[in-house]
Image: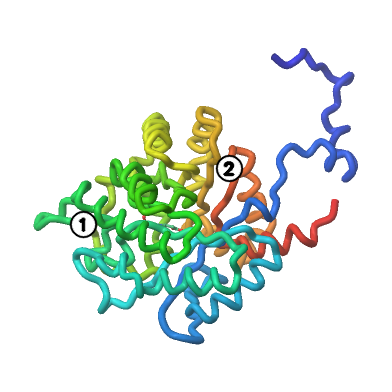
């Protein structure tokens, strides 16, 4: 292991004395290439509605999103992840709007691909923005989540997004067996290059609150929980089982969510599997840091530090609502 290093022969502070040497021995680099911006989309035109619990984040109509895409491309952010805020009138118990080829998400994908073909598009696969009960899956009369019936809907949703031009489909629902079913359907329908980013280790976290406000699912969900499908925050070994299964079913990339509170899980997964691994800095983690920054209790460097922590733990890509600001910060950075 480590040699027996003694003071004063070794003074580790020598390596920290000057900016040039700190730069040379720097172990982890956050780059714009690591960033993915999640964006909330809404119907209509010229809409930009602030989300109170997520400072700096807005729900955008597709025309406004196209404007933002120019900036995203100029900054060099490789990809965005789309999350729809669907009108309540379109929400049903079966969430069938999720696979309406004329729906908001397919339309957004088509428009972005038309104007910015080089920008990677990640389409979230889950029913919660579309169900009248706010769950990610279909439910029976007792509110029980029906795994296998849900998979059929997810497969349709994934095909719908792939047809519209999504580069990556990202199932975030945590049903068992959905990766295999989606992979098989993509193969059968000729979408051999469509990537699957699996939310493999997704925890039943209280840190999704602001997101649920943003997509308008919290009122529908009420007091119901997602504990029967999302993971128990106390578990770690189980995350490795989830990842192993999703990889064997055909996932290309796996994800840990939330990211910042689950660095140990991220580290274990990266060490164990050595596959492309993403982390999602979720809405509550973002809100927590941003609120402190807005109060003057933290500086913006706190946000950059939180992103570097994700990289250090093993993240290859990071979904963060701070992606634009982080990209700007990285651009202006000098040692
Ligand atoms: C739902 C989904 C959620 C998030 C992404 N996809 C919320 C949930 O599981 O209830 C959360 C993202 C965030 O909090 O930023 N399929």
Left or right: residue 170 versus residue 270 is left
Left or right: residue 21 versus residue 75 is right
- Look at mark 1 in the image and give the residue it sits on: 138
Q: Which image quadrant is residue 98 in?
A: bottom left
Q: Position of residue 242 (x, y in %)?
A: 37, 36
Q: Position of residue 184 (x, y in %)?
A: 34, 45
Left or right: residue 53 versus residue 316 is left
Identity of the residue drawn at 58% across and 59% down: 79
**Residue 315 circle label:** 2
* Image height of 319 relative to 2, above or below: below
Q: Which residue occupies the foreground of this view, 288 or 208?
A: 208
- Ligand 1 shows up in the quarter that is bottom left
* Image height of 269 relative to 154, above or below: above
Left or right: residue 204 versus residue 272 is left
Q: How far is mark 2 from mark 1, CA to CA? A: 32 Å
Q: Position of residue 258 (x, y in %)?
A: 46, 48
**Residue 283 visible in the snapshot:** no
Q: Earlier in the sequence, mark 2 or mark 1?
A: 1
């Amino acid at each position: 292991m480590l040699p027996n290093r003694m003071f004063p022969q070794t003074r580790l502070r020598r390596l920290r004395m000057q900016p040039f040497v700190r730069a040379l021995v720097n172990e982890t680099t956050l780059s714009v290439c690591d960033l993915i911006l999640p964006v909330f989309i809404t119907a209509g035109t010229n809409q930009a509605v602030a989300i109170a619990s997520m400072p700096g984040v807005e729900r955008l109509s597709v025309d406004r999103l196209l404007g933002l895409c120019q900036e995203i491309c100029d900054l060099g952010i490789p990809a965005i992840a789309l999350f729809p805020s669907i009108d309540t009138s379109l929400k049903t118990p079966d969430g069938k709007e999720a696979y309406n080829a004329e729906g908001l998400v397919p339309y957004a994908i088509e428009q972005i691909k038309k104007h910015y073909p080089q920008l990677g598009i990640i389409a979230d696969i889950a029913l919660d923005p579309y169900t009248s009960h706010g769950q990610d899956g279909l439910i029976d009369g007792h509110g029980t989540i029906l795994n296998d019936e849900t998979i059929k809907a997810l497969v349709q949703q994934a095909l719908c997004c792939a047809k519209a031009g999504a580069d990556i489909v990202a199932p975030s629902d945590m049903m068992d067996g959905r990766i295999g079913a989606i992979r098989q359907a993509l193969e059968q329908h000729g979408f051999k290059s469509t990537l699957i980013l699996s939310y493999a280790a997704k925890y039943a976290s209280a840190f999704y609150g602001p997101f649920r406000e943003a997509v308008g699912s919290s009122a529908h969900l009420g007091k119901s929980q997602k504990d029967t499908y999302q993971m128990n925050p106390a578990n770690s070994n189980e995350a490795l089982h989830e990842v192993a299964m999703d990889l064997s079913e055909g996932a290309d990339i796996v994800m840990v969510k939330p990211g910042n509170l689950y660095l140990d899980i991220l580290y274990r997964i990266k060490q164990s599997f050595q596959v492309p691994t993403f982390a999602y800095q979720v809405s509550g983690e973002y809100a927590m840091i941003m609120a402190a920054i807005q109060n003057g209790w933290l500086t913006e460097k706190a946000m950059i530090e939180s992103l570097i922590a994700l990289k250090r733990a093993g993240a290859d890509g990071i979904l963060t609502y701070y992606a634009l600001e982080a990209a700007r910060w990285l651009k202006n950075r000098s040692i």
